[in-house]
Image: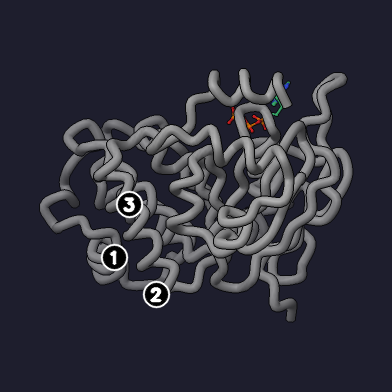
């Protein structure tokens, strides 16, 4: 068995004449956390969507625990098994939560689908507990919850599937800074407990610093720098990474300042 829970090898994806993803490779160790950073349009989301299976690659391979992730799965059992390999948390959980379904029912639906023969009462309580939602939240509908609570529900739902890898695409970008910190702490705790591997897609170097062990920096579809997060942030080798670091107005980035600085690069 591979020591890497996730491997991306030579991924390519073009849209017309735009090379959105241009020979991207990386590995994620079991229980590890890898950040993908880069400014808007650098290819982060397309890479994430290929990993999850929402987008096809023109070339390259994605392997989970050493097994190639096929393009299409036939049959229900295969589709469910594939879903258990990689799950995704999006920026806005509101869009992916049904407004009429209570938190508890969201979790029950997922558990029924993936684990029809287990005790769901206990597991629902465990999941709520794991994401720091009280039993009172169990009956709530999404609109009755704050943004941070909704993101906790989205995280509980993906944990219910017990995935090998969690892809988080700007998962805290829409939240207030103090709530961001709570969710990032929660994700760090969950990683320690579950050993699920994280792939963090973000434009925010603060997030990368907080929750990743390794980072890759993308520019125009290519990986321009890769390494341990602490090293890359402390001593960036590529001018583009240095530029990204210099253009960080806390707590996030100002895309216009980056664009202006890039033109001067
Ligand atoms: N479905 C699509 N059709 C055409 N072009 C696309 C499509 N998806 C992405 N692109 C293009 O591919 C490039 C990479 O986009 P991508 O969304 O992956 O970058 P990103 O780094 O995630 O940016 P952002 O942070 O803004 O989401 C961009 O030039 C984008 O316009």
Q: Earlier in the sequence, mark 3 or mark 1?
A: 1
Q: Is residue 107 visible?
A: yes
In the rendered image, residue 20, in percent from the top left (x then y), is placed at 77, 31
Say which residue label 1 marks. 130
- How does the figure colour the protein chain or chains? one colour
State the residue in front, 117 or 233.
233
User: Does residue 46 sit above or below 185 in this rendering?
Assistant: above
26 left or right of 138 in image: right
| Badge 1 vs badge 2, beta-carbon distance below 8 Å | yes
Label annotation for residue 183: 3
Identify which residue is drawn at 29% across, 65% down: 130
Q: In the structure shown, which secondary structural element does the residue marked by tag 2 occupy?
A: helix
In the rendered image, residue 61, in percent from the top left (x then y), is placed at 82, 54
Identify which residue is drawn at 70% across, 41% down: 218
- 10 Å neighbourhood of mark 3: few (<14), some, or many (≥20)? many
38 left or right of 135 in image: right
In the rendered image, residue 42, in percent from the top left (x then y), is placed at 69, 32
Say which residue label 2 marks. 193
| Badge 3 vs badge 2, beta-carbon distance below 8 Å | no
């Amino acid at each position: 068995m591979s020591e890497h829970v996730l491997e991306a090898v030579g991924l390519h994806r073009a849209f017309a004449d735009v090379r959105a993803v241009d020979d991207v490779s990386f590995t994620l160790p079991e229980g590890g956390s890898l950040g993908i950073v880069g400014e808007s349009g650098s290819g982060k989301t397309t890479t994430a969507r290929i990993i999850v299976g929402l987008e096809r690659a023109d070339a390259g391979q994605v392997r989970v625990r050493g097994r190639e992730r096929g393009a299409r799965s036939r049959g229900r059992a295969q589709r469910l098994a594939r879903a258990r390999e990689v799950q995704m948390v999006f920026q806005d959980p509101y869009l992916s939560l049904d407004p009429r379904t209570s938190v508890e029912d969201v979790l029950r639906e997922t558990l029924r689908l993936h684990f029809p023969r287990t005790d769901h009462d206990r597991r629902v309580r465990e999941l709520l507990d794991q994401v720091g939602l009280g039993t009172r939240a169990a009956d709530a509908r999404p609109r009755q919850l704050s943004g941070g609570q909704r993101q906790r529900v989205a995280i509980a739902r993906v944990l219910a599937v017990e995935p090998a890898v969690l892809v988080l695409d700007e998962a805290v970008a829409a939240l207030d800074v103090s709530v961001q910190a709570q969710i990032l702490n929660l994700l760090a705790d969950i990683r320690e407990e579950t050993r699920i591997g994280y792939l963090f897609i973000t434009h925010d170097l603060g997030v990368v610093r907080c929750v990743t062990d390794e980072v890759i920096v993308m520019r125009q579809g290519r990986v321009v720098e890769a390494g341990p997060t602490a090293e890359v942030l402390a001593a960036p080798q590529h001018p583009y990474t240095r530029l990204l670091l210099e253009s960080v107005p806390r707590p996030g980035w100002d895309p216009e300042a980056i664009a202006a600085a890039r033109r001067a690069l």
